[in-house]
Image: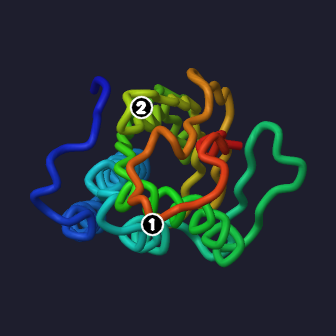
Amino acid sequence: MGNESRPSNNGKPMGLITEATESVSNSSDSSPTIAASERALNGAILAAEISESYEEYLEIFDHFYADDIHATADGLQEPVVGKAAVRARLAGFLVPLHVLAEIGGLSVSIQWSPIPGDRPHETHSAWTLELRGVTGASCRVTWWSRRRWRAGHIVSEHHYNRQQIGGPLTFSDLRFSEDGMTGDTATPFAKLQ
């Protein structure tokens, strides 16, 4: 399986989740079940459209992540533990991204590629997030993720090998009405932590 990117959004991500969950429920082997769950999760992420809604992503998170999720990342001093804490962190990233895409004309694209692994309850993926302003300026962030699965849910996720290509975008790279945003238009907003 090669690089995958967001398909046209003819269907909703939750429809993809439902179809995949039904096929996963009929599987008795752990490795194919986890692989199918990983594909369903990543397919739903790719099919969601941040300019239309950030809630779709939170629904995907609610469906696939365990209540006792343990999230870590290189550079993060303390793990984020528990579904509510991780969900709040995710919403803190998605809400501004949604507003900038919906109102400011920010183009957001995401790609995913699987990385082969050798542990039965673990999956690895390479991700690329590209943000492009209306001026053509862009910021690309790449990272890898390791997920550990239990009973069809992610119990641990670690992000590592993060790299940023291109500087942070500024408000001047976006489209806002004259009576909209005020203040310093050179303030960076896309410096992803």
Instruction: Please indicate whether residue 110 sits to the left or right of residue 162 in the image.
Output: left
x and y, in percent, of residue 72 in the image: 74, 50
Residue for point 66% across, 49% down: 184
User: What is the spatial separation of the Cα atoms under label 1 and label 2, in whole angstroms?
Assistant: 45 Å
x and y, in percent, of residue 118 in the image: 55, 29
Which quadrant is home to the C terminus? top right
Q: Number of callouts in the render?
A: 2
Residue nearest the viewer, comparing 26 with 160: 160
Q: Quadrant of residue 1?
A: top left
Mark nearest the camera among 1 and 2 is 1
Picture disc at residue 114 = 2
First reached walking from the N terminus: tag 1 or tag 2: 2
Residue nearest the viewer, comparing 113 with 119: 113
Circle 1: residue type: Asp
x and y, in percent, of residue 33 in the image: 36, 53
Which residue reaches farthest front? 178
Residue for point 57% across, 21% down: 165
Instruction: Please indicate whether residue 79 sits to the left or right of residue 19 in the image.
Output: right
Q: Which residue is mark 1?
A: 179
Circle 2: residue type: Pro
Is disc 1 placed on a helix, strand or loop?
Answer: loop
Is disc 2 placed on a helix, strand or loop?
Answer: strand
Residue for point 52% across, 36% down: 124
Vertical placement of 145 versus 161: above or below?
A: below
Which residue reaches farthest right? 77
Residue 146 is at least partly visible in this image: yes
Q: Residues within 10 Å of mark 2 (few under 14, many from 20)?
A: many
x and y, in percent, of residue 177 in the image: 39, 59
Instruction: Please indicate whether residue 42 sits to the left or right of residue 84 in the image.
Output: left
Residue for point 42% across, 59% down: 178
Q: Quadrant of residue 17?
A: bottom left
